Image: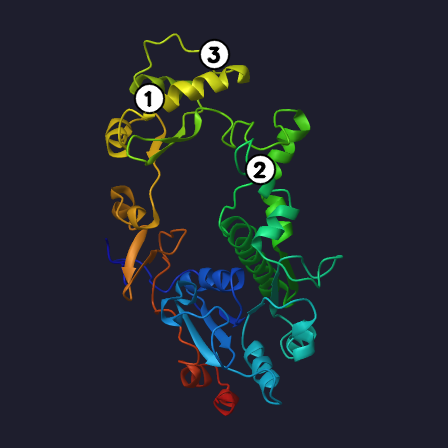
Amino acid sequence: MSRHPTDPSGRDPAGPLHGVRVVELAGIGPGPFAAMLLADLGADVVRVDRPGPSPLGGDPAHDVTNRNKRSVLVDLKTPEGPGTVRALAARAEILLEGYRPGVAERLGVGPEECTAANPALVYGRMTGWGQHGPLAPRAGHDIGYIATAGALSMVGAPDGPPVVPVNLLGDYAGGSLYLTTGVLAALLTARATGRGQVVDAAIVDGTAHLTAMFRGMLAEGTWQDARGRNLLDGGCPYYGVYRTADGGWMAVGALEPHFYTEFVTLLGLDGEDLPDRADPGNWPGLRDLFTARFATATREQWTAVFEGTDACVAPVLSLREAAGHRHLTGRGTYVEAHGITQPAPAPRFSDTPGTLRLPPAVPGAHTSDVARDWGVPGLLDDRP
């Protein structure tokens, strides 16, 4: 496990977003993750937490999505609370919130209120259904958003139910990454024109956007609108997972012909009269052959066979195992920081790398510091 550098030699450790001030109205899931991305890249992110216990429970000191941030406590239901948030927004370039549509407005911290004193503010809104549409006011979670967007139907075996890909696909890929891209694009415009804008990032929109390639393949007839029957959804025998003798799994992605040739050779089937892989009618037979071969040795043994080759085969590692993989340790992909094993900032920059400057922010821990640094003395009056 490598230790992430905080002052790389010859490079500016401040990060590419150094000097950008961000207000994050505390929420759960994709909003905090988007704010973490900005904080990892050097932004000064102030998370506005509400008094009381965390909505998800647990120890906030271990919530990695709150790393590199500072936290203040503000009760938006008090007469002073909304004014304090507006004062923070007046000194920021970006504000992120993840309330249901209309809630921020009712609390007095909506876009109109916050931009009154800061017309250049980029106001990022993170929801599942978006700010308008028939379902906009309804509750929801990742699984429902990706189901509605069509993505969940694509994951799983053809004869089984859709498989839940934890909440990576909706919350973080379709939500956080699109919110982050949106507010940074809007920030460029705001700096050029002096005018901010509202960024409406909906998980259903982002998840649908992620399916762009498959929509094209569906239109040209090279993708079936049914899971487990296509090249990239596990239907293809040379793009899937196989159980090993010890109960482990190996992931195979030998799509290109020359990679496939190396794969079947190392699998010990080079002397076999294999069916034509280009004919989907032969896929079940090929899958049976590959399944039988992988079942003859352990995951460790197959890893030794394929590692260092271009067969495009890898062991399926757990979270704990991944942190110790020699390639990831060699790159410093996972690091030990502030007593927690966690992913390092990504992507990487040659001159202004992201850093792990602060541990996960405990609610209210930085109220005095932010009041001083941002010039918002009213923060101190909101402390319980």
The amino acid type found where label 1 is placed reads Arg
CA separation in Å, label 1 and label 2: 27 Å
Q: Mark 1 or 3, which is nearer the eye?
A: 1
The residue located at (38%, 71%) in the rendering is 59
Q: Mark 1 or 2, which is nearer the eye?
A: 1
Q: Check if mark 1's residue and mark 2's residue have beta carbons within 8 Å.
A: no
Residue 276 badge: 3
CA separation in Å, label 2 and label 3: 25 Å
Number of numbered markers: 3
Q: Secondary structure at mark 1?
A: helix
Residue at which label 2 appears: 154
Residue 153 badge: none
| Position above or below: 169 against 216 | below
Residue at which label 1 appears: 293
| Position above or below: 253 against 374 | above
Instruction: Answer left or right for 285 relative to 245.
Output: right
Q: Earlier in the sequence, mark 2 or mark 3?
A: 2
Q: Position of residue 251 (x, y in %)?
A: 38, 33
Q: Position of residue 20 (x, y in %)?
A: 48, 68
